Image (spheres, helix red, strand yellow):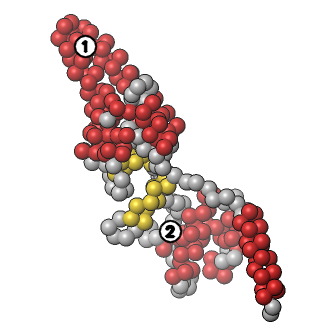
Amino acid sequence: MSPRQHSRQERRAAGEARMDAAAAPPALLDSYREVVTPEGVALRLPAAGPVPRALAWCIDLAARMVVLTTVSIVLGLMGAFGEGLYLVAMFLVFWAYPILFEVFWHGQTPGKRVLGLRVLAGNGAPVGWLAAIVRNLLRTVDMLPLGYAAGLVCCLFDRHSRRLGDLVADTVVVHAPPRLVPPQVPRVPPLAPGQPLLAEDQAAIVAFAERVPRLVPARQAELAGLLQPLTGATGSEGVRRLLGIANGLLGRR
């Protein structure tokens, strides 16, 4: 191959590479914070942005206002002594409220729970007393000069949307994963299979029983018909017998 031909091929390859790069979809930015546990397990924590955090704060503020209003009505009947108690209650509601909830309620205040948010330590561990106290006391700085302006600016410039209190306390607010409800096998009188079953066959029958509540009757009967040699029945009776075998495999009596 002559040098001219070799140079032509290199230019063609470079042109094709540029075209592929232009055609490729742009890499999307995400707000996941990846931490590695001491056991070597990588955790991807979906950091929450300023909007859901602001909504959670508004819910908590409304809850605190309701509590303070109720307390003020009761303590107002106690005169000057009630006024002193009200000041103590106001301090506790505004400052102890988030700290206690975050420590004892798995990093969630009522507002965060409604929005599906949770405060975690920077390494993915549950938030502790010191971190909860520091991040909440530094709200006085995040509020400056007005309306959490400092905290908002910090959230917008931080990769994981952390405000100043989070940076100092080494915490992060994440979207809590939804609680998964394990599938339930409908309870029917257990039956013994008419023949020995392999482990994968047992797993398939239990999986079918777990899916039955989400299937229409026609689909249930269709799948149960595949195991007619095992159950000796088809249709709704075949489904009932398969559910009985599944209950027996699960050890129900």
Please identify, in this view, whether the residue under mark 2 or under mark 1 is nearer the observer.
1
Seen in the picture, residue 151 relative to 171 is either above or below; the reply is above
> Percent from the top left, x then y, of residue 191?
52, 73
Task: Indicate the secondary structure of the residue bearing disc 1.
Answer: helix
Q: Residue at x 81, y 81 (%)?
A: 8
Q: Which of the pair 20/76 is nearer the observer?
A: 20
Give the numbered dot on residue 75. 1
Question: Marks 2 and 1, how far apart in space?
Answer: 58 Å
* 168 with respect to 197 (left or right): left
Q: Which residue is drawn at 67% across and 74% down?
A: 233
Task: Indicate the secondary structure of the residue bearing disc 2.
Answer: helix
Q: Residue at x 71, y 66 (%)?
A: 21
Q: Which residue is drawn at 61% across and 62% down?
A: 212
Looking at the image, tell me whether mark 2 or mark 1 is earlier in sequence order: 1
> Percent from the top left, x then y, of residue 2?
81, 91
Name the residue type under label 1.
Leu
Disc 2 marks which residue?
A: 247
Pointer 2: residues within 10 angstroms few (<14), some, or many (20+)? Answer: many
Pointer 1: residues within 10 angstroms few (<14), some, or many (20+)? Answer: some
Residue 173 visible: yes
Name the residue type under label 2.
Asn
Picture quadrant where residue 240 is located: bottom right
Residue lying furthest front? 3
Picture quadrant where residue 7 is located: bottom right
Q: Give the position of the N terminus as an image quadrant.
A: bottom right
Circles 2, 1 touching at the beta carbon (< 8 Å): no
